[in-house]
Image: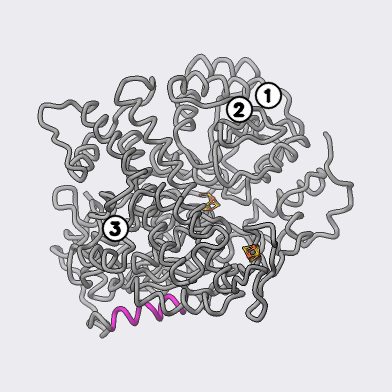
Amino acid sequence: MKKQSKKGESKFYPAASTQTSCTASAKMIDKARKDGAETVFERVASLKPCSFGAGGTCCRVCSMGPCRVTETRTGVCGATASTVAARNFARMIAAGAAAHSDHAREVIFTFIAAAKGEAPGYEIKNEEKLHALAKIFDINMEGKDKNQIALELGEKALAEMGKQQGEIIFVKQAPEKRQERWRKEGISPRGVDREIVETMHRTHMGVDQDYKNILLHGCRTSLADGWGGSMMATELQDILFGVPAPVRSKVNLGVLKENQVNVIVHGHEPLLSEMIVAAASDSELIEEAKKVGAKGINIAGICCTANELLMRKGVPVAGNFLQQELAIATGAVDVMVVDVQCIMQSLPTVAKCYHTEVITTSAKGKILGATHIEFNHHDALKIAKDIVRRAIKNYPKRGRVDIPKEEIDLIAGFSHETIKYLLGGRFRASYKPLNDNIINGRIKGVVGVVGCNNPRVKHDYVHTTLVKELIANNVLVLVTGCAAISCAKERLLIPEAAELAGAGLREVCEAVGIPPVLHCGSCVDNSRILIAASEIVKEGGLGEDLNEVPAAGCAPEWMSEKAVVIGQYFVSSGVPTGFGVSFPTANSEVVSDYLFKDIKEMTGGKWFYEPDPFKMAKTIIKHIDAKRKALGIDREKERVLYDMEMRRDLEIV
Ligand code: SF4
Ligand code: MSK
């Protein structure tokens, strides 16, 4: 076994138990240290962030700089701290929007190829959703089969990405009042490609130098992602792979199997990983695995590829963002297949200490030291089988295997359609029971807890502490991304977690049979939360616009630019949204003040920053209480005992 660092160095690093609240991760941090494999948990201890960069006032957009700007010292060109902070923030929005939307583009290409019959293994699976979307896109379906409709839809979807003028079609999904507000403020989005290009132009040296004007376009770009790119990825994936419905599975490193070939799929796009799951059940490959002494082939996920496969197929999740290197440190991962986003460059270096082969699969995402096997949708199943074969070949090369025992039950699969069915029933699917329970106060409000892990804060701790506080206060929590995986590991995604909820929320969860924390999917699936919130408004009784609903969003352990765009499209949609860890415009009081207060006049939503999970919960609850008061539903209702009819209203079908 090759080692990256000398034995004994570990004693200089913080104790693993102070860096993560996940016991399986703590064990693997210690093991990796003993094995001499350096991970993110050591690197973070030896790298101090630059305060100018962290607070948003380091400008490097031209070679007169880089300029470290302060409130009293401009850059060489005269750019102020507010201009630089707004520019950097807008560029983060654009980069996050690009990541989500490029994901959507790949999905659209595969979707079109599937409709043309040019992508063996893929099919237009969910006709109900296909028809619903075709209706939104004004496609005449008469006399057309599913592939003809899908082809038309795919081509229209592709055109939406680059729509130069006029707003994107999905804007219609938002409540009327919201649409009017966006139009009035000039932020109703055009195609996401157009908005991203304009952000990059405006933030070039010497163009837009009014921080409010830069942030105005930041709002528009974020909306082009939330209601465009991201929504497109989610909706078309649902048609290709199925609309998620409640599904049981397991989470944490314990899902790796000592006596099976383990393949980890990591990244974001489910296009190839869906095929890898199919390949793993191929009888020929299972026989090959048995010939090398394994009992079978086990697929597990990391990050949002994991969430995609979990939501639709119940594939177990090995861990979230900060566990990618730790999974390799178990010594049990025969192949780690990665596509795009949130993949650490260190993976092949860590893998050198073990037997794992790291395989990159996207032309857009190569890593020196990894094997590259390029994915294409014409040949996906064959590529998937080749990858699984490599894992089988690698299995006998394992050294010492040490898999933590943690393997926790969870329920996932809460698409906005599912939430509607669960609450309203298959034949009268509706958000009415949810609205009623918010109005009567059993449920205080709804909060989306989303986003990444960040080694600058204790792994998983901030997410789970915040979520426990929220449910204890009768707040229904919707989770996505790595936040969802944190909550699953803490046993918050099972119906029994209702025991930790306040009396009202607990009553609703027990009547319906759902957990108080609902897993809604991957990062792009935050668009499901936008649609759910719009449905709540359309149902009635909770205001006429998204900013009137007792709801909020937050990313307490955020790290990526995608989290910034998600937060910004929540804010631009009227939903107050909080960040933990640090705030990217902190060095400019002017810009931070604008984002924390004045932006509300334009969007109805605003940002807040609070790294302490208990205080963040208080801030969120205070906001929700204010919304309840404005709606006139703040008075304590008399507790009503459920009669049969009320129970039927809540029953699952
Ligand atoms: Fe410095 Fe202005 Fe160039 Fe930025 S654009 S690096 S502030 S001179
Ligand atoms: S994977 S963007 S670390 S949530 Fe979507 Fe997790 Fe954040 Fe990546």
* Residue 175 appears left or right of 94: left
Q: Amino acid at mark 3?
A: Ala
Q: Residues within 10 Å of mark 3 (few under 14, many from 20)?
A: some
The residue labelled by disc 3 is 532
Could you tell me which residue is drawn at 18 percent across and 63 percent down?
Answer: 539
Could you tell me which residue is drawn at 40 percent across and 63 percent down?
Answer: 219
Give the mark nearest the N terminus, 1 or 2. 2
Range of residues picked out in magenta? 619-629
What numbered label is drawn on residue 458? Answer: none
The residue labelled by disc 2 is 261
The secondary structure type at the circle numbered 1 is helix
Q: Amino acid at mark 1?
A: Asn
The residue labelled by disc 1 is 394
Q: Residues within 10 Å of mark 1 (few under 14, many from 20)?
A: some
* Residue 327 appears left or right of 145: right
Do the residues under discs 1 and 2 have CB atoms within 8 angstroms?
Answer: yes
Q: Nearer the viewer, residue 446 or 287?
A: 446
Could you tell me which residue is drawn at 62 percent across and 72 percent down?
Answer: 78
